[in-house]
Image (spheres, grey):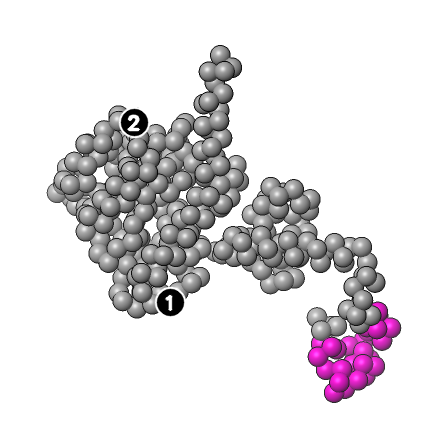
Amino acid sequence: MTWAFIDEHRERFGVEPLCRALRVAPSAYRRHAARLRNPDLRSDRAKRDASLATDIHRVWHANREVYGADKVWRQMHREEVAVARCTVERLMRAQGLQGVVRGKRLRTTWPDLTAPRPRDLVKRQFTADRPNQLWVADFTFVSTWQGFAYVAFIVDVYSRFIVGWRVSRHMRTEFVLDALEQALHARRPDPHRLIHHSDRGSQYLSIRYSERLGEAGIESSVGSVGDSYDNALAETINGLYKAELVHRSGPWKSIETLEWETLNWVTWFNQQRLLEPIGNIPPAEFEALYEQGQAAMPQAA
């Protein structure tokens, strides 16, 4: 900051008066100026910092500018760039780069106390041993200049892969049903081997939604208590979506723009985003490792 201040005001006040006022040696500033003119004069550490800073900015920008120091550091190691986490943190701070911070979640679904409710088969244990064993579903809302938009996600618990999603102008049953149809088409799960878990929102307890789950051979599960912990994993994905896309790119002028950017975010999330619960690798890669393990089992036997 000292050198930048002198650079900015040297023409008006002169270098030596500024150095006296700031209590720095004029020779130190001249060395700084010489390094700016000829980068080869910089120390080895300064040269490496400059190279690492370029890589750090590239990784941060390539991941939608949402990663903090830990995720940037892990991605750089995946790319075989040897660097300490503290160095990444220091250089990100010097460049003014930081990750997003999630906020509080607002309630969007309301229980239908009169509708029959399936049992809670999950009981807040959001774990799975394979893909298409447990899906969780939820939706959230986004304010746009055209009014509220509603965004539904269905997430595979094993890998956190977003298997279905939909953006809508309303929150009627067909909205969440469209997300379910997308998930069924993309994943084609084996009948009677999958549980679908949601909160007690009336959309998920509707006759049409329940019937579609039954037709696909999917067992329905609904949170028993009705607080945020009953569907915590789905709400976590909603929170990431809000923090990494909605709050950073608004205000949203149209629902169509939101839908397009949601598509881009979901693609990035599934294919690139590092997720700590699955070992800081992307969901698609985690599922690919599972498939490789399954393919190797008959050979090993």
Viewer-proximal residue, 301 or 91? 301
Query: Pointer 2 and pointer 1: residues touching (CB < 8 Å)?
Result: no
SS state under label 2: loop
- Reply yes or no: does residue 270 show up in magenta: no
Tell me the number on the disc at residue 251.
Answer: 1
Q: Residue at x 78, y 81 (%)?
A: 18
Q: Residue at x 19, y 48 (%)?
A: 174
Viewer-proximal residue, 13 or 33? 33
Whether residue 105 sits left or right of residue 289 in the image: it is left
* Chief SS of the magenta region: helix
Q: Amino acid at mark 1?
A: Pro
Q: Position of residue 171 (x, y in %)?
A: 22, 53
> Does residue 28 sit above or below 134 in this rendering?
below
Q: Is residue 119 visible?
A: no
Q: Which residues are magenta?
A: 5-32
SS state under label 1: loop
Q: Residue at x 65, y 47 (%)?
A: 85
> Does residue 59 sit above or below 147 in this rendering?
above
Whether residue 91 sits left or right of residue 100 in the image: it is right
Q: Amino acid at mark 2?
A: Asp
Classify mark 1: residues with Cα within 10 Å, few (<14), some (14-19) or many (20+).
Answer: few
Q: Position of residue 220 (x, y in %)?
A: 24, 33
Q: Position of residue 152 (x, y in %)?
A: 30, 49
Viewer-proximal residue, 126 or 133? 133
Compare marks 2 and 1 and give the one earlier in the sequence: 2
Q: Is residue 108 visible?
A: yes
Q: Which residue is mark 2?
A: 190
